[in-house]
Image: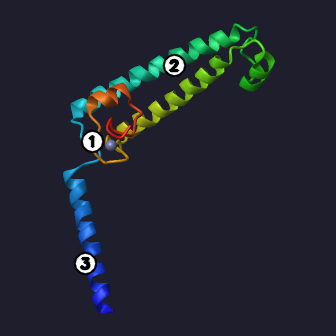
Amino acid sequence: MTASAEPRGTAVLTAEKNFKKDIAENPRCTFSSSDLMSFSKEIINQMDLEISNIQSLKSRLEDFGDDGSNGFEELYCNCKAAVDPDLIVRLDQCNKKFIKLMQVRKAVESGIFSNRCKLCGQPIGLARMMLLPTTRVCSGCS
Ligand SMILES: [Zn+2]
């Protein structure tokens, strides 16, 4: 009975030791500070792009005779016969992408950003992160 307890205790200690070693040798973010700065700038560029997409989609929705002062749901109900439903879907996608970009930006700013693939743990390269700042998986796992 003690024979089974002891190896388990050793296994836990070894796992803890390996975990600490992993964090020290493989930090969550493998980017250099200048790469991280380029990445941060790219996030801001993409956020700006989403803002202009959102504004343009909203103004196209307002072209359907609404002054924009109504709530979005009311606008949708009033105009759903006339509005291209794709506009609504795209506006929703742009809003969601903007929020995701904002979350990545916050993670970078607060030092908790990780470029490790959530599936295999390998670092995701700068080129892929620049292209898809909100991705959580490497190209091999996607
Ligand atoms: Zn992966």
Give whichever of 112, 96 is nearer the camera: 96
Indicate the position of residue 79 as horizontal and vertical percent values.
77, 15
Indicate the position of residue 45 as horizontal and vertical percent values.
39, 20
Mark 2 or 3, nearer chain start: 3
Indicate the position of residue 56 as horizontal and vertical percent values.
57, 11
SS label for mark 2: helix
Give whichever of 106, 116 is nearer the camera: 116
| Left or right placement of residue 125 versus residue 103 in this view | left
Q: Which residue is mark 2?
A: 51
Indicate the position of residue 138 as horizontal and vertical percent values.
33, 38
Q: Foreground mark, 1 or 2?
A: 1
Q: Is residue 77 above or below residue 19?
A: above
Q: Residue furthest bottom?
A: 1
State the separation of the CA atoms marked 1 and 2.
29 Å
Asked if labels 3 and 2 touch by Cβ distance under 8 angstroms, the answer is: no
Give residue 35's quadrant in the image.
top left
Q: Is residue 114 above or below residue 67?
A: below
Quadrant location of the C terminus in the rendered image: top left
> What scheme was used to colour the molecule?
rainbow
| Amino acid at the residue labelled 2 | Ile
In the image, which disc is placed on residue 10? 3
Q: Which residue is mark 1?
A: 123
SS label for mark 1: loop
| Amino acid at the residue labelled 3 | Thr
